[in-house]
Structure formats: C-alpha cells, structure tokens
Image (cartoon, rainbow, N blue to C red):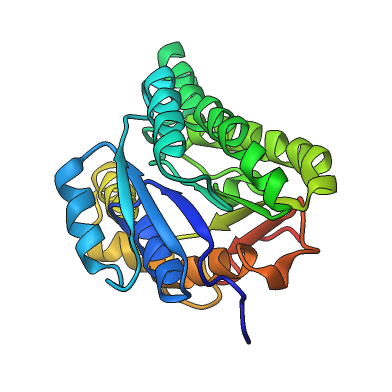
Amino acid sequence: MNLELNNKYALVCGSTAGIGKATAIALAEEGVIVTLIARNEEKLKAVLAELPQHRNHDYIVADFSNPSELKSKVEDYIFKNHGFHILVNNTGGPKAGPIFSAEVNEFESAFTQHLKCNHILVQTLAPFMKVEKYGRIINVISTSVKQPLDGLGVSNTIRGAVANWSKTMANELGQFGITVNNVLPGATATERLSSIIKNKAEKTGKSIDESATAMKNTVPAKRFAQPEETADAITFLASARAAYINGINLPVDGGRTKSL
C-alpha cells in the first residue's frame, strides 16, 4: 500500500526515545521529512543520525514545561524553514501514584505539558495545514482514556482531558482536510513501562520479573508491545489513506482494554 507520505513534513514530539523515536523513524522511512522536538539536544542529535540520510531532517530543542518557549521556538522554526503537514503530540507520562495522594501541582504540571502544549502546537501548525488542505494530528495518549488504570491517578485525569479536547478539535478542523486522532498505547516496552513495573515490584514485594509477567498476563497477546508497533499505527493515521478516519481513539494494546 502506498501511503502517499513522500515529502510531507512532520513534527514529532518526544522523539528521543520510545514511541516518539520509533514514530520518527517509521515516518522517515516512508519519505517524510521529519523534525524532531524534545528538550535534550544530545539525544536529538543521536536520533537524527539514525534517520535515513536522503532527506533534510532536523530538530528543535524545547522544553514542554515551558509553553511560551515552545510556541516561540516552533513559530521561529516555521518562519525560517517550513510548516508541517503532520503533528505527533507525544509527551512523557505524569508521575505514577494513587489520585488521592497527588499534589495539586502534579495536575497543573501534567495539564501544561500535555493539553496546553498540544493546543499551542495545533494552533501554530494548523494555518499551514489549512493552506495545504492536508493535516494529520495524532495524539499519543493511553488506554486509560477508555479504562482508567490503577495507580495512575494524575495520568488518567489528564489523558481524559486530552481525549475530549482532541475530539472537539477533530469536529472543528475536519472541514479543512485536517484529521485529529488519538492512539492509545497499552503496555509498551519503554523506559516508562520499566519504571511502572519497578514501582509495582516495590509495593508488592515481588521481583521485577514476577511483576512484568503478571502485567503481561493481563494482555490477551501475553506480551508487551514494541514501540515500532505503535509507530506503525501512527504512520498509517498520518497517511493519505487515512483521510476519512477522524476523531477516534485507537487502542494499540494487544486486546487488554475490556471496553469496546
């Protein structure tokens, strides 16, 4: 299947590791000109070196805890270079823990890094997408949108807010040839999952291997996803072939989520 992505421009957030990095590579392999964005310049340079070298890929250094800086840097990049057809909103998840124990500032910080920054990027990138009559906004969220996950109180709360923001945005932007969709990763072999497993092991007194096995057993596939499997779903949603898919939540979770 020809995804018709050659020479499209993409901005991929959180692209120095995990799903973000895998997505940047997957898009680049389809001929997309990728701009990475994250806060660690050395890691950005390392990922940039892994992308196919026949395209002028690039990166932006920005910290998602500072929305005004993010806005300024992306606007400056667009002014000096080009706009983007594809936006992949992807940011590290909030600190784990029960919701009752969460401090108010944890909600504020997560809201800023996820919803506020997503909103700023969409407002900044959408004008170019409207002119091109081609826009793909893909938000990497969590299956907690459909089924809250134990021990991830702040994350469950903020992810739900982002999902509703996204659906509303999809309704407003669809007329311009812009789609807005959410990809909901399940248990994926990333640094964040390793951290969650370690937390569970410490709280239950089980070994890390035992905790990992218990988590795998909640998945019909009996394994964790690889970041590349989620990246493939994102890449399809970014393509011309997905033009009539808009406003959805797509779980990539091996069947773990119990709801439809």
Q: Quadrant of residue 122?
A: top right
Locate residue 81 relative to residue 56 in the image: left or right. right
Which residue is drawn at the image coordinates 77% and 62% (left, top)? 245
Which residue is drawn at the image coordinates 46% and 67% (left, top)? 27
List x then y, in percent, for residue 85: 58, 53
Locate residue 240 relative to residue 32 in the image: left or right. right
Q: How many marks?
A: 0
List x then y, in percent, for residue 38: 31, 41
State the residue lying farthest toward the bottom.
1
Quadrant position of the N terminus in the picture: bottom right
- Which one is in front, 60 or 56? 56
- Is residue 207 visible in this depiction of the protein? no
- Which one is in front, 100 or 51? 51
Which residue is drawn at the image coordinates 42% and 13% (left, top)? 105
Q: Quadrant of residue 258?
A: bottom right
State the residue lying farthest toward the front.
80
List x then y, in percent, for residue 81: 41, 44
- Is residue 220 visible in this depiction of the protein? yes
List x then y, in percent, for residue 165: 69, 33
Quadrant position of the C terminus in the picture: bottom right
Locate residue 120 relative to residue 67 in the image: left or right. right
State the residue lying farthest toward the left.
42
Which residue is drawn at the image coordinates 66% and 60% (left, top)? 250
Is 234 placed above or below 149 here?
Answer: below
Locate residue 234 relative to residue 187 in the image: left or right. right
